[in-house]
Image: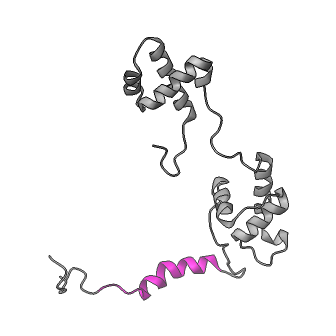
Amino acid sequence: MGNLAGVKRDFRALERRRLRAARLLQQGCSEAEVARKVGVHRQSVNRWTQRLAAEGREALRKAPRAGRKPRLSEADRRRIIVGLKRGPEALGYETGLWTSWRVADLIERECGVRYTNVHVWRILRELGWSCQRPVGRALERNEKAVRRWKRVRWPELKKTPENKGAPSFSSTNRD
């Protein structure tokens, strides 16, 4: 059946389920009964029974991590975060905007690993970074005047509907 996209497997829970099945099998329960009790397919229980008979309970212990091993170590990830905080200007780019190309360049320079743009965004999400544009504000900006304009002037300029509660005359709307 597999896992839903994006749902991580709980390897401890899977191990507990296999070991519970092993206990039930050793108590004399049939494979079909064990499958019902632990909530798996009978073929899984059959496979576990064979492994239990051939290699013992240790064969049903936690499986190693799923999938390919990561190409970036924790030290690499820390170096990437430091590089991101320095900004793209530190790499010689003219603006302070991180693009996937620029982040891929940073990763390649810092860690010697080349990634596609799609994977770069996955890594950024894992590191807790999100897609944002830098705030470009004028140095001369008067925050007090901006707050006053938003509080006083903007409501005066903003249009409001006149007959707010008037019924619609559209033939598609029903009252």
| x and y, in percent, of residue 76 in the image | 79, 51
Q: Between 46 and 62, which is closer to the camera in this rendering?
A: 46
Residue furthest toward the left?
175
Q: Between 11 and 18, which is closer to the camera in this rendering?
A: 18
Say whether residue 9 is left or right of residue 143: left
| x and y, in percent, of residue 97 in the image | 71, 73
Q: Where 58 falls versus 83 (above or below)?
A: above
| x and y, in percent, of residue 72 in the image | 76, 50
Which corner quadrant holds the N terminus? top left
What residue is drawn where x is 61% and y is 23%? 59
What residue is drawn where x is 69% and y is 81%? 138
Say whether residue 158 is left or right of residue 86: left
Kindly indicate the quadrant of the structure image that contains residue 172.
bottom left
Which corner quadrant holds the C terminus? bottom left
Give the residues drawn in magenta, as a range.
Answer: 142-161
Q: Where 38 falls versus 56 (above or below)?
A: below
Q: Main secondary structure of the magenta part?
A: helix
Kindly indicate the quadrant of the structure image that contains residue 114.
bottom right
| x and y, in percent, of residue 109 in the image | 84, 62
What residue is drawn where x is 47% and y is 48%? 4
